[in-house]
Image (spheres, rainbow, N blue to C red):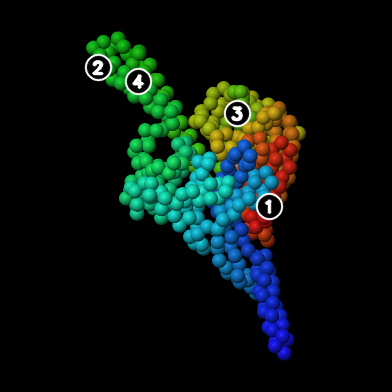
Amino acid sequence: MRKTGCFVTTAIIGLIVGFIFLIRSCLSNYDEYAIEGSAQVFMQPSATVIVYIKDHYDVSYFSQEGGVTNISGTRHYYLETRDALSLTLSKSTRLDGKDAEVPKILGNTGRLLWIYDKQLKAFDPFTLTMVCNEDKLVQQNPALRNILPVETRYYTYNYSQNRLEVFTKTATRFSIGEDFKAIPLEEETEKEPADIAQLKAKIKQYEALQSSQYNNPNYYHRRDSIWQMEKLVRKLQDKYNDEKEFRERLNEMQNGQFSTSDNLIINAAVKDSTVYALIPRKDMDTTNTYFYFRQYFSEEEQHFLCKASIEEISKSQGLHSSAKVGKWKSLSPGQYFLKGNFLLNKQSLEPITMHNPESWLVISVKEIAQNSPLLLQRVEPNGKIRWTKELPIYSFTDLLYIPDKAIVFCSKPASNDDDQRDKLLSVDVQTGDYLITGLNKP
């Protein structure tokens, strides 16, 4: 009897455990997965990985009555790495953040990943080993004790200097590098990029010369040279402002967390004093007009790849504002692109350019419809299309370009898609072949 009782008890426990696992398995079908913030890419000779924070909404209750669906659960966050080409999950580690306490990627140095997860942390992106936290940072920098902020908006990453910048609770600013040494930002400003520093030095030099000329008794005999100096100072100041604006926008792009693809595309590229643009047919007959570079899907018209010589350009480094161009020449009269744009390289603020042969990546839609699949094409400057691929996504919110290897899209599901889980899509830029995976897949 005792053996029979033990067997029955074991069987009942087994059934209960099995039933629980069955319920959990069914509920997991409603779990939601998303990328929190922007993804990052890290490259080594032996491997290239993408790193992101995964937002996992773990559903513990689901009910549906009439047209109303009720879901509840717990939100957890994971730091994950995947191979950039195969999208195979390499590493995953659970973060401290939970529910509303959202961790955030702050930036990467190329060798380290900075995140905020209830405190400031730095990780090795290939092993996901935490190499620094606030305790270690304060031990090395006693001036930071008790003043590090608890809100992510007070942390910014300066990609031009490759350092994390912190605005503390005492309104002081520090810059932190890979050596984890915190330097007051007032001192760090002296280490600005060489080209900016040289321009500022030249401006000061010529301004001093101007001042000495104004005070010279022979001022009227030297007016021409003074005006030349003033012209040169203005030119240098314009160049300085352009460089500064470019670096600010570069930081914005590389720190960017985008809700749409608008900031990741542009309607034209420049090569050898020629602008290559995707324009509607009505604009093809214009001559000696200004063409404006834009960063969004334009009017719902057929756009054709054309080129025109640049006669005059208004340009700040990286992104062009406008250019006066000659007559447009159609490069592929029978080929049009719907909502076509060039994909933008976030590292340079220029269209993604590939070589052997030289070409660009053009993104468009298959048809004018709310949820039309995207088309990706590799297009040469002569208008030849090397390959065309229809992608199994409707939109994307981030992209990572790995030179001459792949481009990785972070894809959001369509509003009417039953599967509300973010996806990753890796495209081989040589062939157009792609792999796609959900964040829950190993």
Residue found 56% across the figure and 56% down from its top = 93
Between 319 and 107, which is closer to the camera in this rendering? 107
Q: Mark 3 or mark 2, which is nearer the start of the sequence? A: 2
Residue 349's mark?
none
* Three-letter amino acid code of the residue under disc 2: Asn
CA gap, disc 3 and disc 4: 33 Å
Residue 206's mark?
4
Between 330 and 69, which is closer to the camera in this rendering? 69
* Three-letter amino acid code of the residue under disc 1: Thr
Q: Are discs 1 and 2 less than 8 Å apart at CB?
A: no
For mark 1, what is the residue?
Answer: 437
CA gap, disc 1 and disc 4: 58 Å
In the image, residue 157 lies at what x, y percent? 46, 43
Q: Secondary structure at mark 4?
A: helix
Q: For the residues carrying marks 2 and 4, which lies nearer the camera in this image?
A: 4
CA gap, disc 2 and disc 3: 46 Å
Residue found 65% across the figure and 51% down from its top = 89
Above or below, 331 against 42 in this view is above
